[in-house]
Every structure is written in C-alpha cells, then in structure tokens.
Amino acid sequence: MTKIDQNKIKSIREKHSKGELVKDILKSLAFGGVLAAGLALPNIVQLLDFFGVTKSSEKFKIIGAVERMKQNKLLKIYHKDGADIIEITELGKKKVLSYDLENIKIIRSNKWDGYWRLVIFDIPEKNGKARRALSQKLNEMEFFPLQKSVFICPFECKDEIDFVTEFFGIKKYVRFVLAKNIENDEFLRSYYNL
C-alpha cells in the first residue's frame, strides 16, 4: 500500500465534509492496522489522542463515525487481553486505497538509472472492466503503451503498480519486469526526454 501523508489528516476541530471524518479515521487506522482501544469502546483513547480530542462533543463525533464504519464493515472491534481492539478490515483497506487512487503518479527521478520498467498483463475477459481501468490508469501515470497489454516506464514505479493492481483485484494477472536493454529504444528515450 502507498504511504499516506499523515499531515493531510484533519484535526477533529476542523470542519469535515460528509464522509471525510470516516476517511481520516480509516487512514489513521491504516498506519498501524490495529489499534488497542482501552477497556471499553467509549474509551477509544488512542484514536481520540490521535485526533487531539478534548471536548465530549468531539469524542461523540469520533465514536459515532467508528460505529458507522463498524456497521459498514470497514472495521471490526473485538475484545482481547482486557482491551477492545479496533482493526481495519480488508474492505476498509480497499476504501483507503480508493482515496489515493486518483492522485497516484510516478515521480520522475533527476537521473535515469538505465532500467526500463515493464508492466505486462493477461487479464481474463471476466475481469474486462478491471483490465480497461488498469490500461487507463497506466496511461494517466504516463506509461508508454508498447502493445495492448504491455506498458513501459523508465522510472521507479513498483510500489505504485502493486497499489493499482491490488486495488483492481488483478495482481495475479500482472507481471512487473525490470529490463536493462530494450531493442530500438531511441523513440522511448526521446518520448521521456532521457
């Protein structure tokens, strides 16, 4: 999963638009995956501390959001070793990924390391929608389409590809190749201004 910028998470005292508090709570849980919550759910100490909660109205706002996320199966709460544990579910993790999918991009390094990164896929027709979404996302990320299911990029992008393919649920159909030499790559070097 890509790293989430903790600085982008708002304080509870800031105004949250609809769904934004849930988004921030999920992101905070995604940092560690599991959060020990104290002796009882109304005492979700660590989560409250994370958001800097000082007023009871802020506390109820967080607890309400946590309860809604539990109902929507984005997180689960269970008792272990004398504490209630809040844990983000697979569905919750997928939701966190969706928040950053639109903004994911490849960072161009100052100096090219001389390696080409190829993304090769053979995705079954039953996953056609995911295949089209992957192709579109690779184009948005400025990969060059060598063929219908082969894309290339000269910059480090393994984490981003893992993120995107995991999100679309097609990771097992995608291969990532690191290549030193691509025959007749002059047009690619020109395309990427290398």
Image (tube, grey):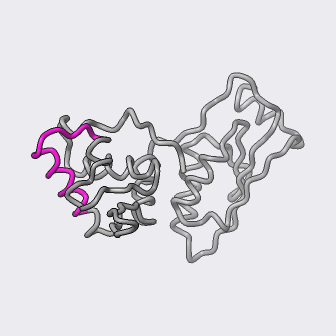
Magenta stretch, main secondary structure, is: helix
Q: In which quarter of the image is residue 53?
A: top left
Front residue of this view, candidates 113 and 70? 70
- Residue 119 appears left or right of 91: right
Front residue of this view, candidates 70 and 124? 70
Of the 4 image quadrants, the one containing the C terminus is top right
Is 191 covered by the magenta stretch?
A: no
Q: Which residue lies furthest to the front in this view?
A: 82
On screen, residue 194 above or below 164:
above
Q: Position of residue 49 (x, y in %)?
A: 29, 41
- Residue 127 appears left or right of 47: right
Identity of the residue drawn at 35% across and 64% down: 75
Identity of the residue drawn at 53% across and 46% down: 2
Is 60 covered by the magenta stretch?
A: yes
Front residue of this view, candidates 38 and 175? 38
Q: Which residue lies furthest to the left in this view?
A: 57
Front residue of this view, candidates 124 and 172? 172
Q: Position of residue 105 (x, y in %)?
A: 55, 39
On screen, residue 95 above or below 53:
below
- Residue 168 appears left or right of 158: left
* Magenta stretch in the rendered image: 51-68
Q: Position of residue 66 (x, y in %)?
A: 25, 58
Identity of the residue drawn at 70% across and 50% down: 151
Q: Residue furthest top?
A: 110
Q: Quadrant of residue 86?
A: bottom left
Q: Where is residue 17 in the image (x, y as percent from the top left)?
A: 20, 44
